[in-house]
Image (spheres, rainbow, N blue to C red):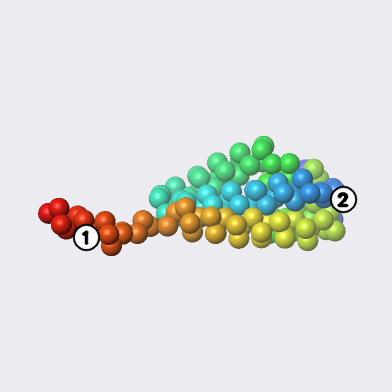
């Protein structure tokens, strides 16, 4: 805020509410968590730029401008700018973010799981040898 000569402590008056905003926030959180988990599974060294690229893209494709995490949502309540969110709108955003993150954990657990070898396939391989 100081850079723009604004008061350092502000309370946002920017309304961010409604099912579209909440759904967008769930999608943003889902994508962020899934991106991190996929990075951990395949290229952990790439996680910093994967997250940066995802957040940059999600800013443009979500109606909520992709807060994607409760810490960011809370911080933006103290910014009375376009990036802000009214404190009264925080609970629904945070619930949406948590739901999106939980769904990402479930989907990632299913899609990114290590392949399991089948006892039938193993016995056929041994028989073929």
Q: Is residue 87 left or right of residue 125?
A: right
Of badges 1 and 2, the one in the foreground is 1
| Residue 76 locus on image (x, y percent) | 75, 53
| Residue 57 in sight in this render | yes
Task: Judge by depth and name the residue closer to the eye, 14 or 39.
Answer: 39
| Residue 59 locus on image (x, y percent) | 66, 41
Task: Judge by depth and name the residue closer to the eye, 112 or 71.
Answer: 112
* Residue depicted at x 61% and y 44%: 55
Residue labelled with disc 1: 123
| Residue 96 locus on image (x, y percent) | 71, 56
Task: Judge by depth and name the residue closer to the eye, 121 or 53.
Answer: 121
Rendering quarter of residue 95: bottom right
Secondary structure of residue under mark 1: helix
| Residue 81 locus on image (x, y percent) | 81, 45
Secondary structure of residue under mark 2: loop
The quarter of the rendered structure image containing the C terminus is: bottom left
Q: How many marks?
A: 2
């Amino acid at each position: 805020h100081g850079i723009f000569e604004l008061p350092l402590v502000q309370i946002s008056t920017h309304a961010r509410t409604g099912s579209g905003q909440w759904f967008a926030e769930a999608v943003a959180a889902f994508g962020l968590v899934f991106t991190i988990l996929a990075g951990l599974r395949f290229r952990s060294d790439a996680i910093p730029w994967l997250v940066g690229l995802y957040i940059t893209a999600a800013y443009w494709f979500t109606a909520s401008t992709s807060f994607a995490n409760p810490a960011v949502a809370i911080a933006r309540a103290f910014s009375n700018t376009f990036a802000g969110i009214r404190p009264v709108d925080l609970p629904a955003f945070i619930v949406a973010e948590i739901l999106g993150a939980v769904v990402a954990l479930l989907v990632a657990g299913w899609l990114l799981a290590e392949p399991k070898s089948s006892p039938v396939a193993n016995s056929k391989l041994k028989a073929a040898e």
